[in-house]
Amino acid sequence: MGMPPYGTYTTSHEPRIFCRNSTRPAHHLIPESARYNAQGDQLMTENIENLILEHLRTICAEIVTLTRKVDTLTIRVGSLEEHVAGLRRDLALIHADIAATNQRLDHHEQRLDRIERRLELTT
């Protein structure tokens, strides 16, 4: 949604003035005569405040939506971390089983070597 640096927008019958990338109100863009109606009431200030409030409400709604999404993603990442931790435990148990199997094979190999030597089957 591209906006020019300053300008007038009309959403119904009310002109809306804004000044982008500035912390100053947009009053400096409006001539003094255009800021007040015939009774001397300030017109543009209310419109500017309404526009700012409208933008703030939109921003707040988007922040709420983003917060919900971040909360959902945080829960999902936590779940993934638990699953990864479980997989690591399983992998560690597999490594322990392989080590125990190798130890048993080494023991059987030593016994077989002793038996072959006693029976003088080795050449």
Image (cartoon, rainbow, N blue to C red):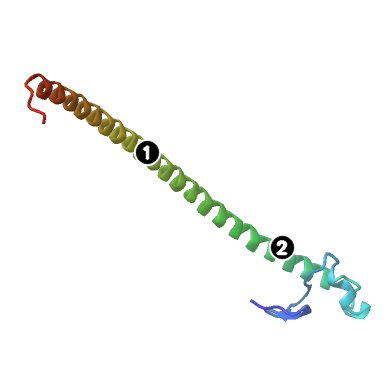
The quarter in which the C terminus is drawn is top left
Return the residue nearer the eye: 44 or 99. Answer: 99
Q: Which residue is drawn at 32% across and 38% down?
A: 91
How many labels were placed on the picture?
2
Q: Which residue is drawn at 31% across and 36% down?
A: 90
Q: Position of residue 56 (x, y in %)?
A: 69, 61
Above or below, 15 against 105 in this view is: below
Check the image and name the residue furthest to the right: 32
Above or below, 58 against 17 in this view is: above
Q: Which disc is residue 88 wearing?
A: 1
- Specify the quadrant of the image occupied by residue 14: bottom right
Q: Where is residue 108 in the image (x, y as percent from the top left)?
A: 16, 25
Return the residue nearer the eye: 12 or 61. Answer: 61
Q: Regarding mark 1 in the picture, which secondary structure is present there? A: helix
Q: Which residue is drawn at 10% across and 24% down?
A: 116
Q: What residue type is labelled 2?
A: Leu
Q: Which disc is residue 53 wearing?
A: 2
The quarter in which the N terminus is drawn is bottom right
Identify the mark nearer the N-term, 1 or 2: 2
Q: Regarding mark 2 in the picture, which secondary structure is present there? A: helix
- Kindly report which numbered mark, 1 or 2, lies closer to the viewer in this rendering: 1
Q: Would you call the spot at circle 1 few (<14 residues within 10 Å), some (14-19), or many (20 or more)?
A: few
Q: Residue at x 87, y 70 (%)?
A: 42
Above or below, 115 against 60 in this view is: above
